[in-house]
Image: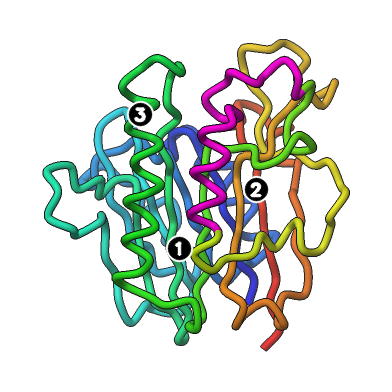
Amino acid sequence: MKIATYNVNSIRKRIDILHKWLRQHKPDVVCLQETKVQDHEFPLQAFADLPYVINFCGEKSYNGVAIFSRTPPDLVSFGFGDGEPQEDSTRLARVVVNGITIINTYIPQGFTIDSPKYAYKLEWFQRLRRYFSRVVSPGQSVIWCGDMNVAPEPIDVHSPEKHLKHVCFHEDVRRAYQETVSWGFVDVFRHHFPRRQQFTFWDYRRPGALEANRGWRIDHILVTPTLLPYSHTANVDIQPRREESPSDHTVLWAEFLA
């Protein structure tokens, strides 16, 4: 099984790039974030010629998650379902495909360290850990992927000493992320490449960031120990970021042997 995660930063603006990547690489499952489109405007027809079942939940201009799968899922759900006022259905999707639970998240970015949005981000990780405990167990086959908006280690961000107060690298958010990971997940990219510096995001606002490789690794694919022995490889495809009118993220993918 080949699974990919991609923050498209508006799916309607990224139709050609995404369609091309799907045709060329033929993944079994693709998890998208920041689709930025209401459900009734989701561009289903643009992908009608491809063999995917598409499940999505979005809103106008912000957030939005989608999962493309070759096999129709046995279960589809959106949001935490924990009774809290803010369900965050456009940030969290879950499907079960061929006995594997796939959870797709778009973690809040946080804005600034002193912002209520950052406090919400930290709480989001705690809430997500509780969600994992409620819907799955570490002994099951689970893949958690998406835009986590966290660079876990100094190797995962350019010039780390300059970003110690950044909402995606501050020690508090890194700790919150690792506490969630410790529920029972392993980062498959780091499992295969412990020392490789490889980014998934290059800021639009920094001219020449891609060419100079001034980026961040904030998109991740993680698995429970049950799946780790089947993890064949993982990698980042930079080409979508080099296309005309790209997202500021690119595609991360992982392959598992049957």
Q: Residue at x 78, y 68 (%)?
A: 233
Tell me the amino acid under the disc marked 2: Val
- Residue 119 numbered tag: 3
177 within the magenta span: yes
Q: What's the CA distance linking mark 1 and mark 2?
A: 14 Å
Circle 3 Cα neighbour tier, 10 Å, few/some/many (<14 / 14–19 / ≥20): some
Q: Are marks 1 and 3 in contact (CB under 8 Å)?
A: no
Q: What's the CA distance linking mark 1 and mark 3?
A: 31 Å
Color encoding of the figure = rainbow
- Residue 251 numbered tag: 2
N-terminal-most mark, 1 or 3? 1
N-terminal-most mark, 3 or 2? 3
Name the spot of residue 196 as percent of width and height, x first: 87, 47
In this view, the mark in front (1 or 3): 3
Residue 85 horizontal side relative to residue 257, left or right: left
Name the spot of residue 192 as percent of width and height, x first: 81, 63
Circle 1 Cα neighbour tier, 10 Å, few/some/many (<14 / 14–19 / ≥20): many
Q: What span is colored magenta in the figure?
A: 160-181
226 within the magenta span: no
Tell me the amino acid under the disc marked 1: Phe
Q: Considering the numbered disc 1 on the image, is that residue within a helix, a strand or a loop?
A: strand
Tell me the amino acid under the disc marked 3: Ala
N-terminal-most mark, 1 or 2? 1
Q: Quadrant of residue 55?
A: bottom left
- Residue 68 numbered tag: 1
Q: Quadrant of residue 94?
A: bottom left
In this view, the mark in front (1 or 2): 2
Q: What's the CA distance linking mark 3 and mark 2?
A: 28 Å
